[in-house]
Amino acid sequence: MAQVQRMSRLMIKTLRDDPADAETLNHKLLVRAGYVRRTAAGIWTWLPLGKKVLENVTRVVREEMDAIGGQEVLLPALLPKEAYEASGRYDEYGDLLFRLQDRKGSDYLLGPTHEEIFTQVVKDMCSSYKDLPVILYQIQTKYRDEARPRAGVLRGREFQMKDSYSFDTTDEGLVEAYQLHRAAYIRIFERLGLDHRIVSAVSGAMGGSASEEFLAPAPAGEDTFVDCPNCDYAANTEAVTYKATAADASAAGPVEELDTPDTPTIETLAAHLGVPASATLKNLLVKVDGEIVAVGVPGDREVDLGKLGEHLAPAVVELVTAEDFVGRPDLVRGYVGPQGLEKVRYIADPRVAPGTAWITGANKENTHAKNVVAGRDFEVDDYLDVVVVEAGDPCPNCGAGLQVDRAIEIGHIFQLGRKYTDIFALDVLGQQGKPVRVTMGSYGIGVSRAVAALAEQTADEKGLCWPREVAPADVHVVAAGKVLQTELALDVAEKLNAAGVRVMVDDRAGVSPGVKFTDAELIGVPKILVAGRRSAEGVLELKDRRTGEREELTVEEAVARLAARA
Ligand code: ATP
Ligand code: MG
């Protein structure tokens, strides 16, 4: 049977002040409430209370992974480099990878994620279509030498991840495994009490096609995403698309040059002409695989180089430098306009729709041109959505003004396809007796990060405030007084424990009731049961940590009430 956790015996030290090096709420509160200690930058020790919360998250993840037929395994974290060399990631990961050597000088790494090794395991174990499909998962320590491990447990250099991998012989099978994971993740985050959004993601370095991220909105998050206040649309900022509508240009006059001395920037130009920046067309020059390309966006918008890079990948996008203008009289720095760019590929944002008229560079020093109409005076070679999304941009779904919010990435699901199975030639014998190349998905949840994300989302000014499923106990009994109160507290704690309620009791001698209350609120167990003034009558006070609601109950009533929710 579970034991009552007595605070008099618990290894805990609560702090009144935030640790000096803490920048994020989860770091401050998890340290102050005695859940974790920082061992080194991005490396954490989980103390007894923290370990309980981590275990609770792990249990929920494990139960839901088992429910979709996942089989739990445990692969090593210490890995020989060869598999990662075969995939190219030994180099691609660069400084993110922890590398080390054994006594013989052979190279190893500490696993940042395990696609390569799982592919090898399945190649080793499965030879026929009858062995598939299979979903394998592990809950394991991962290592990434993060550049900025400053967000507390949110971004560790050593952290806990649930990673799973699906292997199928057909594309339909992969889609099914992906959907199973998607549904399991929704259940996991709902059970954990994590507010989350699912956004489509750009699959980046992992390769492959369909991919979605699970984001937990929180100010401490390092991701930004857009959220529609009116419908259920949510997306990665890089994935938002804008629907252009063509304009009627018949009323626009002919192109006219304007004398605009000393106006090489949009700000100076708009001020000189007394027009809004949105009336001007900004032309950013970039190099795409070394070739100069112009990118046109409305003057009040910024080009999102990440988005542009995603559109043009695998081509490499760089900014131009002064040297690139040498020998290019057609490119007049600060006064570029698309109407004169004969030899330059012109990419434009959809807002530069056919028929829209602009004030833009005249391709002459100190000169601009007005009434420059898209489709009449210049052609757009490619329309690409390349501007930085801003709050108020229209929702692609319903047209309402979008919000831009910060979030923590708590999970990620990928249909990898055959990227790794091609590398390791993972085939099984198909139904027709011919080898079939296996297709693969990969799915991650930041288990330790989920603890930090929960702390960020649920804390209030008094401290942590856990949802019951993950809390280190269901109820925190406080002995607010001396012998009588302590006896009553221990008595009710034992009865609660016997009724299956997870209970923690503050039976510390020589600690004032005020300190005990402050600690209970900082620790954040969802219910606080106080043995105080009316202990002689056997009456306790039950307080809800979140709402602060209080009621007086006898021991029997308290046990019945709390056990009913167990
Ligand atoms: P990020 O963009 O935050 O660096 P990632 O996209 O590199 O994360 P994945 O490779 O998709 O992360 O890993 C799967 C999951 O593991 C992530 O969704 C996240 O929840 C978690 N995770 C990744 N890096 C860390 C870290 N340094 N500390 C804690 N959890 C992490
Ligand atoms: Mg990710």
Image (cartoon, rainbow, N blue to C red):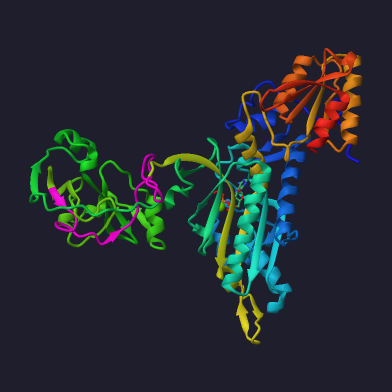
User: Which residues make up the magenta segment?
Assistant: 371-399
Q: For the view shown, which residue lies furthest in the bottom direction?
A: 433
Q: Main secondary structure of the magenta part?
A: loop
Vertical arrangement, residue 309 with respect to residue 540, above or below: below
Q: Identify which residue is drawn at 46% across, 43% down.
A: 227
Residue 16's spot in the image, x, y percent? 68, 20
374 part of magenta stretch: yes
Residue 75's spot in the image, x, y percent? 73, 60
Image side of residue 357 versus residue 347, left or right? left
Vertical arrangement, residue 17 with respect to residue 445, above or below: above
Residue 439's spot in the image, x, y percent? 59, 71
Q: Quadrant of the N terminus?
A: top right
Picture quadrant of residue 428: bottom right
Residue 415's spot in the image, x, y percent? 56, 63
Picture quadrant of residue 551: top right
Q: Is residue 401 visible?
A: yes
394 part of magenta stretch: yes
Vertical arrangement, residue 210 with respect to residue 261, above or below: below
Q: How many marks?
A: 0
Q: Is residue 109 visible?
A: no
Picture quadrant of residue 454: top right
Image side of residue 97 versus residue 47, left or right? left
Q: Identify which residue is drawn at 74% across, 31% down.
A: 525
Image side of residue 240 versus residue 59, left or right? left
Image side of residue 490 versus residue 49, left or right? right
